[in-house]
Every structure is written in structure tokens, then in C-alpha cells.
Image (cartoon, helix red, strand yellow):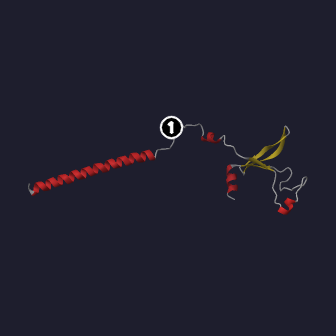
Amino acid sequence: MSDNQDDQSLDDDWGAAIAEQAKAEADALAQQQSAQAAVFKDFSNKGSAPATQNDIDFILDIPVQLTVELGRTKIAIKNLLQLAQGSVVELDGLAGEPMDVLVNGCLIAQGEVVVVNDKFGIRLTDIITPSERIRKLNK
């Protein structure tokens, strides 16, 4: 074999190797893109009908603690230990003043006491707006 044929054969081998490598890289890139497409799915609601009417339906049955607060006070342990049946503890709430309605400890409304069928209840007189609730949380 002559040097010219050896060089041409060597060039063909290198060309074939480079073409094979380029094909392998293209295949690897295609596999990577399909894997990314599977991992990073489009979760937007474009072109799809909502599965439920409202997402809030999922939380409607979750129980929460509703508390109506008559008033509060601070008392020393010495005075607390002296309390007996019939003792009166003064609260900071005034008679006729609206009472606080709390859900899980968060103020959501105010209202007045009512009696219905020998049971106490509360008539809501003022609902706290979401912006007011957030402002009070930030204090």
C-alpha cells in the first residue's frame, strides 16, 4: 500500500469515527430532551378543563376550632390559688362590647351573645377582612 492510500484510509476511518460520535451525541441529546420533557411536564391549565369545580372543595370538610372570647385577664399565681367556688374574676371585656370570634386562634369576626333554645350563640356583627387579618398577623 502506498502512503497516499494509507492517508486516505486513515481519513475515512477518522471521518467515520467522527460521524459515529456525532450520531451518538445527537441520540444522547434526544434522549435527554425526552427525559426532561417527562420530568418537567406542563402543569398550566391551558386548553384543559378544570378537574374540579373549585379547589376549595377539597378542604371544606376539614374541622377547625371556633372560639368565642368573652375577655382576658392576667392574674398572679398567688391570687389564682385563692379562687374558690363563687369567686369572681374580672375580665378586660366590657358589658355590651362585641366579643371576638377566633378560628384556630386567629380573629375572624366580632359579635354579640344571643340565647337560642336555652343555648348560647353569637350573632356576627363584624367580619374581619382578609387584609385586616394579615395586618394583625404581621404585628
Q: Which residue is mark 1?
A: 48
- In this rendering, the answer to whether 137 lies above or below 27 is below
Q: Residue at x 31, y 51 (%)?
A: 25
* Mark 1, secondary structure of its residue: loop
Residue 13 percent coordinates (x, y): 19, 52
- Looking at this rendering, what residue extends furthest in the left direction? 2
Position of 91 compared to 61: left or right? right
Q: In the figure, residue 125 lies in which quadrant? A: top right
- Identity of the amino acid at label 1? Ser
Residue 105 percent coordinates (x, y): 72, 51
Q: Nearer the viewer, residue 100 or 72?
A: 72
Position of 128 compared to 6: left or right? right
Q: Residue at x 20, y 54 (%)?
A: 14
Q: How many marks?
A: 1
Q: Residue at x 43, y 44 (%)?
A: 38
Residue 28 appears anywhere in the view:
yes
Binning the other alpha carbons within 10 Å of mark 1 as few (below 14), some (14 to 19) or many (20 upward) gives: few
